[in-house]
Amino acid sequence: MAAKPCIPKGTRDFSPIEMAKRNYIFNTIRDVYHLYGFQQIETPAMEMLSTLMGKYGEEGDKLLFKIQNSGDYFSGLTDEELLSRNASKLACKFCEKGLRYDLTVPFARYVVMHRDELTFPFKRYQIQPVWRADRPQKGRYREFYQCDADVVGSDSLLNEVELMQIVDTVFSRFGIRVCIKINNRKILTGIAEIIGEADKIVDITVAIDKLDKIGLDNVNAELREKGIGDEAIAKLQPIILLSGTNEEKLATLKEVLATSETGLKGVAETEFILTTLKALGLKNEIELDLTLARGLNYYTGAIFEVKALDVQIGSITGGGRYDNLTGVFGMAGVSGVGISFGADRIFDVLNQLDLYPKEAVDGTQLLFINFGEKEAAFSMQVLAQVRAAGIRAEIFPDASKMKKQMSYANAKGIPFVALVGENEMNEGKVTLKNMESGEQCLLTPAELVAAIRK
């Protein structure tokens, strides 16, 4: 008996209706990126592991899908190495390539490889799938799409401002109410300095980034596990739990970080972004959130995260400034900043809130019923005119029973059917039936187009 087919956990098939919804998401984001002057590129699904490893922190490296080398990959191994059963070391021997974890690191690699062809600042967007060997759960998948926009070759904070405008515009078009959260890695570095744990900045950011997921007590326990003392943890509490308006938080931070040059620089950058955006006016809320840490190692300045207000789900957009990313590929001194929309989570949010516009998911508008060879030949000529007018139309390929063809139209939600018999052919017309009302009328091809458009 044949084995029942299945797909890997954390991946999904998408039906035609679901694909129509996903394309609505991609097209909306793509249109807004174009408004702001971004150009599209694509990079391969797989990259060299040397490109990917070490760019996402220790936790990120564990989530890389590695691709087994073809050929006899045992030939270069000793018996001792095989018997050691050291999975990570053996994987490095077996695998030279991996599936991309995000689009930012491949983009940095692209910039370095194509630097002579690019005009800087270079504004690119990329809409492609990424893969992570994560534990699948609600809202978290192993294969999912990202929709990235990045600017490299400019230090200006106007780039951060425009990226936040893009986020605001996209979610306004979707009709999703969101909170845009902003922080700065320089502020976090300053906090680490003033509590006396400057060398533990990565441990601190990785831990406090989990505050929403695991709670304050567990964050503090993780900090202790990383060797951070109780006195330092105590100093950290009021900073993590800082409340008030954005202006009040900034004022407090200026006092708290008065002895940290790096921290004050982060406050100044954040103040510029928030003040500029306030003057421009966003439709959605923007909040300075000191618990926003984003554990990825490459962020060096502003960091962003977007949460949906009406649905319980994780971050649906994120990003930040990464001054040093291209340096690891031999191209120092190139600053970049970017955002990434999580298309799969946005898909789930739009589904839960039922926010898809009807026209985004509409399929075929008109089905020609097939009564036989002569009728089909006539219908094909009218069909060509209808399609030329931009109406989505098809003909049932077989001269099946009428009931079967009408059931097909109902199953696909086709709102109109065209009936062509001997009388219609003699008059050069088509009978149009409205599937919802049952109303029928005899029309010329031009009238048929006008009726469906109406």
Image (cartoon, helix red, strand yellow):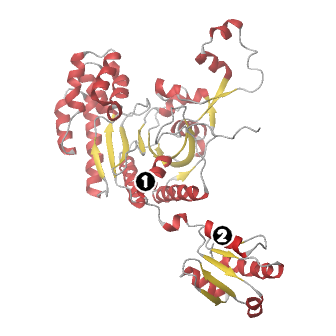
Question: Which dot marks residue 352?
Answer: 1
Residue 152 at x, y percent in the picture = 47, 43
Q: Nearer the viewer, residue 142 or 189?
A: 142
| Residue 55 in the figure: left or right of residue 442 | left
Q: Quadrant where the N terminus lies?
A: top right
Residue 196 at x, y percent in the picture = 25, 18
Asked if residue 116 is positioned above or below residue 178 in the image, the reply reads above
Q: Nearer the viewer, residue 213 or 245?
A: 213
Q: Mark yes or no: residue 240 visible.
A: yes
Asked if residue 126 is positioned above or below residue 71 in the image, the reply reads below
Residue 177 at x, y percent in the picture = 34, 55
Q: How many tags in the picture? A: 2
Q: In what element is the residue under mark 1? A: helix
What residue do we see at 18% from left, 30% from top? 256
- N-term mark: 1 or 2: 1
Question: Which dot marks residue 407?
Answer: 2
Amino acid type, residue under disc 2 in the picture: Ser
Q: How many neighbours does mark 1 have within 10 angstroms: few (below 14), some (14-19), or many (20 or more)? A: few
Q: Residue furthest right?
A: 373
Are the two marked residues, 1 and 2, in contact with CB atoms closer than 8 angstroms? Answer: no
Q: Quadrant of residue 51?
A: top right
Q: Mark yes or no: residue 148 visible.
A: no
Q: How many neighbours does mark 2 have within 10 angstroms: few (below 14), some (14-19), or many (20 or more)? A: few
Amino acid type, residue under disc 1 in the picture: Gln
CA distance separating discs 1 and 2: 29 Å
Residue 224 at x, y percent in the picture = 31, 17
**Which callout, 1 or 2, points to the residue nearer the camera?**
2
Question: Which dot marks residue 116?
Answer: none
